């Protein structure tokens, strides 16, 4: 994460509950830019940033081991940051946001302020402490009390047990990619030369056997 990112001003009007598992429609509702006065003064100079809703979004996959490892730590976030909404979305089932927000792998944690993405968590250590450090560095908030993960955090809302379900969309995409690759290879000059070499070798081998007989 870049150190020159300006902190965002999170609104303290609401206290949020546990992590909410959302679908694409619900996430769109949460990321709609909230109406409010402009952040610029009349003379065109930048004024003090106005408070806005802060949301932590976890892009995860139920079959991903790393997502499962991060799950209990993310489930504990709402206790430490009461005024930040924490949501999680299955990036495999709801892929429409992946390209839009540059999600190239899971788990990916992203902070959103007033509907606008601020930064993504780039560390490889998925712990409550690292999540809290990331959040505090980008906001005007500090953890509420001590940081701890309970046994209940391992059960949900985001599951810490990887599922064995088959991602058929992923399987079909791999089959399609492999089929395309094989097609273009079969049409290439290199492949045609390779086939000719095999055919010539086979003819020579048969000719030698016939000569011996």
Image (cartoon, rainbow, N blue to C red):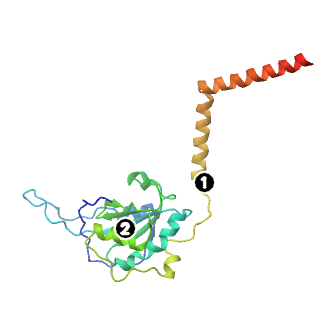
Residue 81, horizontal then vertical, whole percent: 34, 76
Label 2 vs label 1, nearer the camera: 2
Judged from the image, the secondary structure of the residue bearing numbered disc 2 is strand
* Total residue callouts: 2
- Residue identifier under label 1: 168
Lateral position of residue 25 relative to residue 4, left or right: right
Report the residue that reaches farthest toward the bottom.
Answer: 145
Q: Which residue is drawn at 62% across and 35% down?
A: 182
Of the residues under marks 2 and 1, which one precedes in the sequence?
A: 2
Q: Residue at x 39, y 52 (%)?
A: 100
Report the residue that reaches farthest toward the right.
Answer: 213
Residue 58 found in image quarter: bottom left
**Quarter of the picture holding the N terminus:** bottom left
Judged from the image, the secondary structure of the residue bearing numbered disc 1 is helix
Residue 3, horizontal then vertical, whole percent: 27, 61
Q: Which residue is drawn at 30% across and 58% down?
A: 2
- Residue identifier under label 2: 56
Q: Which disc is residue 97 wearing?
A: none
Residue 123, horizontal then vertical, whole percent: 40, 62
**Mark 2 burial class by Cα count in 10 Å: few <14, some 14-19, many 20+:** many
Report the residue that reaches farthest toward the left.
Answer: 43
Q: Residue at x 52, y 68 (%)?
A: 68
Estimate the spatial distance between the alpha carbons at disc 2 and disc 1, rounded to whole Å.
29 Å
Q: Tell me whether the residue at label 2 lies in contact with that at label 1, contact meaning CB atoms closer than 8 angstroms.
A: no
**Mark 1 burial class by Cα count in 10 Å: few <14, some 14-19, many 20+:** few
């Amino acid at each position: 994460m870049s150190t020159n990112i300006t902190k965002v001003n999170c609104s303290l009007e609401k206290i949020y509950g546990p992590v909410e598992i959302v679908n694409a429609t619900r996430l769109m509702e949460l990321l709609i830019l909230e109406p409010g006065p402009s952040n610029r003064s009349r003379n065109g100079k930048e004024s003090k940033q106005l408070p806005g809703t802060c949301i932590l979004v976890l892009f995860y996959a139920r079959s991903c081991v790393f997502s499962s490892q991060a799950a209990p730590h993310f489930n504990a976030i709402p206790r430490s940051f009461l005024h930040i909404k924490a949501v999680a979305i299955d990036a495999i089932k709801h892929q429409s946001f992946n390209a839009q927000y540059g999600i190239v792998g899971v788990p990916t944690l992203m902070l959103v302020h007033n509907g606008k993405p601020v930064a993504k968590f780039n560390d490889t250590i998925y712990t409550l402490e690292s999540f809290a450090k990331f959040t505090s560095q980008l906001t005007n908030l500090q953890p509420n009390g001590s940081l701890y993960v309970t046994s209940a955090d391992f059960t949900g809302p985001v599951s810490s047990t990887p599922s064995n379900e088959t991602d058929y969309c992923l399987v079909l995409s791999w089959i399609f990619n492999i089929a395309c690759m094989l097609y273009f290879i079969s049409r290439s000059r290199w492949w045609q030369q390779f086939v000719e070499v095999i055919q010539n070798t086979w003819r020579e081998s048969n000719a030698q056997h016939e000569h011996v007989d």
